[in-house]
């Protein structure tokens, strides 16, 4: 390598050292002759304001829903605990829900807006004996909840259907409401059994059907009295004095109207016709 190449190499090496020193923050060394080297070119500062026409879009972050308590699901068969019996057809279970016995209607026991009816207390006591404080099985038919917010169900205690027990004891009447008709024949047979055995509501004599009475005939009016016809006398026979029948009591005899009299013809004055008197001879015409 010649002398010129060594000088170029030394110059490049010195420039690299100056660049490295400037990058590390060291003050630049003076050039031979006491002059400072020219500063290196720097990049423009970054733009801090957004460009016009570009807006930031907020990003919606979907949070997971918080866990909330849900009511128990009563589909098919469900087990529940009875807290209190309201009457012969409804009771309260854990969770604050009211269950209504399907297929029957018991007399009111004075609760839930229903007045106390004959047989209502007996039906409520029997339902309390069968259900209150026990674990029961609830079977759903077609309706999940009725219009009153109650759960219509078939209820079982130790495998025995309480709906049928109350009907067979005569403590309720059959009340099948479509579309919940799964056991309507079984419940109808239980009510027929209670009627034939005269149990509960069917203990008294059954009312016999009465036929509608025929309308009473209108009272007949009394017949008018008949007057016997009067015999017409012959011209040459002597007439007996006619006696008219007397009017019946309460009726007045009709008064005969006077016979009409023919008007007497009159002549105009000055006609010149003389009216003959009796016994005079009239001239021949």
Image (cartoon, grey):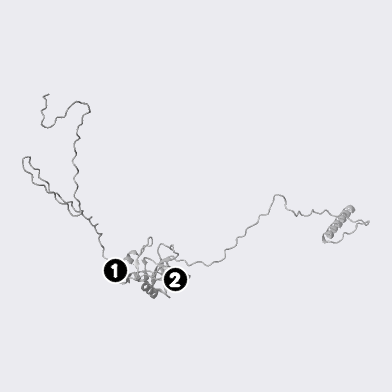
- Reading the chain from its start, which is encountered first: label 2 or label 1? 2
Residue under numbered circle 2: 92
Visible residue check, residue 167: yes
Q: Quadrant of residue 87?
A: bottom left
The location of residue 243, given as percent across then percent down, is 12, 49
Q: Quadrant of residue 124?
A: bottom left
Visible residue check, residue 1: no
Q: Is residue 165 left or right of residue 24?
A: left
163 or 3: which is nearer to us? 163
Q: Is residue 94 left or right of residue 235?
A: right
Q: Is residue 130 left or right of residue 261?
A: right
- Residue in the picture at 32% in, 70% down: 201
Q: Could you tell me which secondary element the residue under label 1 belongs to?
A: helix
Label for residue 195? 1
Contact (Cβ within 8 Å) of mark 2 with mark 1:
no
> How far apart in space, not on screen, are marks 2 and 1 (Cα)?
30 Å
Q: Quadrant of residue 276?
A: top left
The location of residue 171, given as percent across then percent down, is 34, 71
- Residue in the picture at 31% in, 67% down: 191
């Amino acid at each position: 390598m010649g002398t010129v190449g060594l000088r170029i190499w030394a110059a490049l090496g010195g420039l690299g050292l100056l660049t490295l020193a400037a990058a590390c923050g060291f003050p630049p060394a003076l050039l031979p002759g006491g002059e400072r080297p020219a500063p290196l070119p720097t990049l423009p500062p970054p733009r801090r304001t957004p460009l016009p026409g570009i807006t930031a879009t907020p990003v919606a972050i979907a949070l997971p829903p918080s866990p909330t308590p849900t009511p128990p699901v009563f589909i098919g068969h469900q087990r529940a605990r009875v807290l209190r019996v309201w009457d012969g057809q409804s009771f309260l279970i854990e969770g604050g829900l009211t269950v209504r016995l399907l297929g029957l209607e018991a007399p009111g026991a004075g609760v839930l807006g229903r007045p106390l009816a004959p047989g209502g207390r007996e039906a409520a006591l029997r339902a309390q004996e069968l259900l209150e404080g026990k674990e029961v099985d609830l079977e759903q038919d077609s309706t999940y909840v009725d219009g009153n917010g109650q759960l219509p169900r078939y209820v079982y205690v130790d495998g025995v259907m309480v709906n049928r027990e109350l009907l067979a004891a005569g403590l309720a009447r059959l009340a099948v409401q479509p579309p919940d008709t799964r056991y309507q024949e079984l419940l109808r047979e239980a009510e027929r059994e209670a009627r034939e055995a005269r149990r509960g509501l069917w203990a008294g004599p059954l009312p016999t059907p009465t036929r509608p009475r025929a309308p009473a005939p209108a009272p007949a009016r009394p017949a008018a009295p008949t007057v016997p016809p009067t015999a017409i006398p012959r011209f040459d026979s002597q007439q007996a004095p006619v006696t008219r029948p007397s009017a019946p009591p309460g009726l007045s005899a009709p008064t005969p109207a006077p016979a009409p009299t023919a008007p007497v013809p009159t002549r105009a004055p000055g006609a010149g016709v003389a009216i003959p008197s009796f016994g005079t001879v009239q001239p021949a015409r």
